[in-house]
Amino acid sequence: MSRIPARVAHRLTSALKRFQPILASARARDVNESDTVILVTDLLAELFGYDKYTEITSECAIRGTWCDLGIKQDGKFLLLIEVKAIGSELKEPQTKQAVDYAANQGVDWVVLTNAETWRVYRLTFGKPVTSELVLEFNISQLQPRREADLEILYHLTREGWAKSAIDDFHMQRQALNRYVIAATIQSPPVLDALRRELRRLSPDVRVSKDEIQAVLLNEVLKREVVEGDKAVEAARKLQRAATRALRARTSRQETAEVASAEPVAAE
């Protein structure tokens, strides 16, 4: 495995082989939600590697109600898990329920699962709180010896969590988000590059960045990726990244100037 430790890959492979027939039997028997919670607890321990007695908890009281399971380390929830019966279809109201649990508890990550299908959501605490589906997989459809399938599971393992695998995966998804790409295309550096290339094609033609952006907005990019809350948030993320880069560059320049101004000690 490229980035999965060998012992973790072995555990994932072995546990998948063991649990896939168990899940198929449970689905055929149409087991209830309580029994599905037991299945999920075993999966969290034997597949994903969390300690059943110190890290997996069912004590998740949240404002007068209960979330089924949670992963807790050092007294703090890493994620909450809302479980539905294995034969049930995961629906939007259930997603809202799981997200509300995490929002009320102040937890960034929440899972909605029926033991086979797992949906992993990342919350953004703003006004209002929003959620994003970051990862979805069906354990019964994964291949135990397929590296890409083990990579999917690794994001949610105890070892992967310690390495921030799910956060890295989320950041990669954000970088390839269509709203972020649309905002990047409209950024000043990219508009400058487009302007240079267009002038190279037609040296006698003069076009401005505003004209290029107007064509992008009206004729090239879909309206849905340049308008609305997601487009605005993507533009803000891009601006924040540019500001961080500028600060880092300024800091490096100031450090270099201070260093060059220091007198050289005589030998």
Image (tube, rainbow, N blue to C red):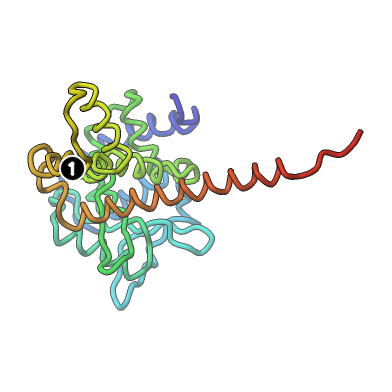
Q: Which residue is mark 1?
A: 213
In the image, is 246 to the left or to the right of 119? right
Name the image quarter holding residue 172: top left
Q: Quadrant of the C terminus?
A: top right
In the image, is 101 to the left or to the right of 24? right
From the viewer's side, name the closer residue of 146 and 220.
220
Point 18% across, 42% down: residue = 213
Mark 1, Cα crowd under 10 Å, few <14 / some 14-19 / many 20+, is some
Give SS at disc 1: helix
Residue 35 visible from this viewpoint: no
Residue 180 point in image, percent of width and height: 26, 44
From the viewer's side, name the closer residue of 93 and 261.
261
Q: Is residue 83 above or below residue 67?
A: above
Point 24% across, 33% down: residue = 195
Point 31% across, 30% down: residue = 149
* Count of numbered badges drawn on the protein: 1
In the image, is 191 to the left or to the right of 90? right
Residue 41 point in image, percent of width and height: 36, 51
Task: State the residue lying farthest toward the right.
Answer: 267
From the viewer's side, name the closer residue of 95 and 33.
95
Residue 15 visible from this viewpoint: yes
Residue 6 point in image, percent of width and height: 49, 27
Name the image quarter holding residue 84: bottom left
